[in-house]
Image (cartoon, helix red, strand yellow):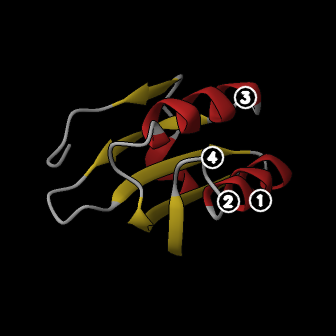
Amino acid sequence: MRVVATTITGRVQGVGYRYSAARRARELKLAGWVRNTEDGSVEALLIGEDASVAKMLDWCAVGPPAARVAAVHTADLEPGDYADVSGFDIREGGGA
């Protein structure tokens, strides 16, 4: 089990990034969430098997067709702190 906090920068708001990310995360059977931030980036919490998280991070670096990802910043977190998280949600946040 791996838990990763992710920040994606570039042209990632107003291009369907959150909805596409949630769809891909659900396909990969990940738990967590995705949201816009006030600074124009997108944040995500990814929880799941190592291989699935790695595939999602690869997807995050590209995003949906209209996105232009500049960078993906990650931080691994302690899995035990997120044992009760299930499903993958689109959260409200700042930004578009």
The residue tagged with tag 4: helix, strand or loop? loop
Q: Residue at x 29, y 32 (%)?
A: 91
Q: Which residue is mark 4?
A: 65
Viewer-closest of 13 and 92? 13
Q: CA distance from mark 2 to mark 4?
A: 16 Å
In terms of sequence position, does the residue under pointer 3 or pointer 2 come before the other? 3
Residue 52, position as x, y percentages in the image: 79, 46
Looking at the image, residue 33 sits to the left or right of residue 36; the answer is: right
Viewer-closest of 49 and 72? 72
Q: Residue at x 53, y 67 (%)?
A: 69
Looking at the image, residue 74 sits to the left or right of residue 58; the answer is: left
Q: Amino acid at mark 3?
A: Lys
Select label 4 or label 1 by which is in front.
4
Q: Amino acid at mark 2?
A: Leu
Q: Amino acid at mark 4?
A: Pro
Circle 2 packing at 10 Å, graded few (<14), some (14-19), many (20+), is many
Q: CA distance from mark 1 to mark 2?
A: 5 Å
Seen in the picture, residue 34 relative to 5 is either above or below; the reply is above
Circle 3 packing at 10 Å, graded few (<14), some (14-19), many (20+), is some
Select label 2 or label 4 by which is in front.
4
> Circles 1 and 2: CB distance less than 8 Å?
yes
Q: CA distance from mark 4 to mark 3?
A: 22 Å
Q: Residue at x 70, y 53 (%)?
A: 59
Residue 74, position as x, y percentages in the image: 52, 73
> Circles 4 and 3: CB distance less than 8 Å?
no
Q: CA distance from mark 4 to mark 1?
A: 20 Å
